Amino acid sequence: MIKQSEPITALYCRLSKDDTREGESNSIANQKAILAKYAKEHGFGNIQFFVDDGFTGVVFDRPGFLAMMDGVKNGAVKTIIVKDHSRLGRNRLVIGTLLEEDFERYGVRYIAIMDNIDSDKGLSDLVPMQDLFNEWHAKNTSQKVKAVKQAQGNSGIPLTGSPPFGYKKDPNDKRKWIVDEFAAEVVKRIYALCMDGKNTSQIATILAQSQVPTPGEYWRSIGTPTAAPLPPMPCNWSPRTISDILDRTEYIGHTVNFRTRVRSFKNKAKVMNDPSQWKIFEDTHQAIIEIAVWERVQEIRKGRKRRLKTGKTSLFSGLLECADCGKKLYYSTSNTGKATNDHFVCGNYRSIKGACTAHYIREKAVHDLVLLHMQRVLVYVQQYESLFVRVVNKKSTEDQTRAIATKRKTLDQHRKRITELDLLFQRIYEDSVATRISEERFMKMSESYETEQAILKQESMKLDAELQEEKQSAANIVRFLSIVRKYTEIETLTPTILHDFIEKIVVHAPDYTSGKRKQKVEIFYNAVGILDVPSTDEMIAYLKERKAKQLAEPMQLTKSA
């Protein structure tokens, strides 16, 4: 701002979203009229309006206020007039500093018309009390708004101001989302590229090269207001934007509320809530991404491994696990540069010598083993589907029975211990009252008991939820069959095929007891776990059994007739 010969009289107006509920009296137009009239009647010249429309009074990074304060600091503004004192702000500590230090230091006269405040006449001792009431008003309003949002969020109404990229608000009901066809196709492409093994940086590059507009550019092109900044170059997607899209649960048709919160009514900065505090409402709008695809993408991203310095990556990065310590096996290239020597080793062995053994396995061996097994599984399921369903159902039932028994036993133990801790806490409290133990001892023991009990309660809730989800075998078989039906044969492995079929690959330590190196590798398929392909004899026996049943059915019908 250029310093002028005649000092500026700053007429400051502010209106927050909450103030709009109080009617026209606080509108920007009304404030301007009152301020202009007062300035004219009292002989203030060189007036200039500074306006903040839609800004709360508890924060001070408002553009109009900051521009006015720039004028104060460079000596251009010598008088500030507001309609009422709360227009300047509702944070008593900041307002106190402005009135008692900043305005004094820069020689600024401050006037609040409706509150009869004029710093040239001296500030009343009641002004700090008025600042406190203004802050309480802001806090009370914030609590009311929070209660309304809480009620809306708990009822399943989306709390986000605008739908995620891929959706738009329903013109007939602003609380509902409908699919935006153009944006939805971009979202589907992003998920398909991730399934195909591309990382966020690679996906961003592909979209930029294809001249696909970013969300901010697209929203502006269709006239939708957005605070998202435009990229420095057109269609310049950032990996962060891709990552956000791949993380959004909303794309499978669910509404997610309470994902974030503000720090306080004074600090509006948003912070992420723990996922346990999120409220998820299922099937509230049309899904863009299938649940199976979304879940697989989350698994891929969880196991994503950075490229090596050589620029090489492996199809199997993030899929291999150590059978002994559960750590991921890391991909390493050979110093010789030969692809046949590329291998995987246990992460614990690499990072902490002695924590685990190497579990060394060549990448080529994994590739050949997985490809062969997948080919056999594909043929088995395609030609003997009913046998596959029978075997997997039996296995799932057995596994499920064992898992449920173990979890129920653990849950019973946790609940018993929680009850014991209640009794122990009651006893030490009685001992403390009777002075049989010191207060310091009581505090230490009670803290220990409460911590243990809190952990047990959390684990019990998790176990209880897992027990409720155990009966999924039928749905899992249908899901796996739908994957198999997508392929007629598998000649080579691709990231998409691998991620469609494989959940994880567990590698055991080499066994030398026979005098030769043998290594057990377990392949876990999505939804159905480990699959053992029946032998030829077992398949022949099954065919004979099925044929015998088919021949017997007409005879049974004849007898019953």
Image (tube, rainbow, N blue to C red):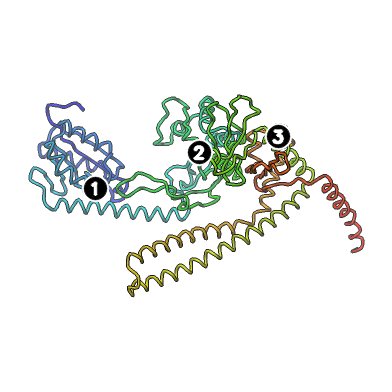
Look at label 3 and name its amino acid: Asp
Give whichever of discs 2 and 1 has the lower sequence position: 1
Seen in the image, is 480 located left or right of residue 332? Answer: right
Mark 2, secondary structure of its residue: helix
Q: Position of residue 231 (x, y in %)?
A: 42, 28
Give whichever of discs 3 and 2 has the lower sequence position: 2
Q: Residue at x 41, y 36 (%)?
A: 226
Disc number placed over residue 41 in the picture, else none: none
Q: Nearer the viewer, residue 405 or 527?
A: 405
Mark 1, secondary structure of its residue: loop
Q: Residues within 10 Å of mark 2 (few under 14, many from 20)?
A: some
Image quadrant in which you'd find residue 495: top right
Look at label 1 and name its amino acid: Asn
Q: Is label 3 in contact with label 1 (beta carbons under 8 Å)?
A: no
Look at label 2 and name its amino acid: Ile
> Which quadrant would the C terminus be assigned to in this image?
bottom right
Q: Nearer the viewer, residue 242 or 527?
A: 527
Q: Is label 2 in contact with label 1 (beta carbons under 8 Å)?
A: no
Q: Residues within 10 Å of mark 3 (few under 14, many from 20)?
A: few
Mark 3, secondary structure of its residue: helix
Q: Position of residue 551 (x, y in %)?
A: 90, 54
Name the residue carrying label 3: 368
CA gap, disc 3 to disc 2? 34 Å
Q: Nearer the viewer, residue 316 or 92?
A: 316
Name the residue carrying label 1: 91
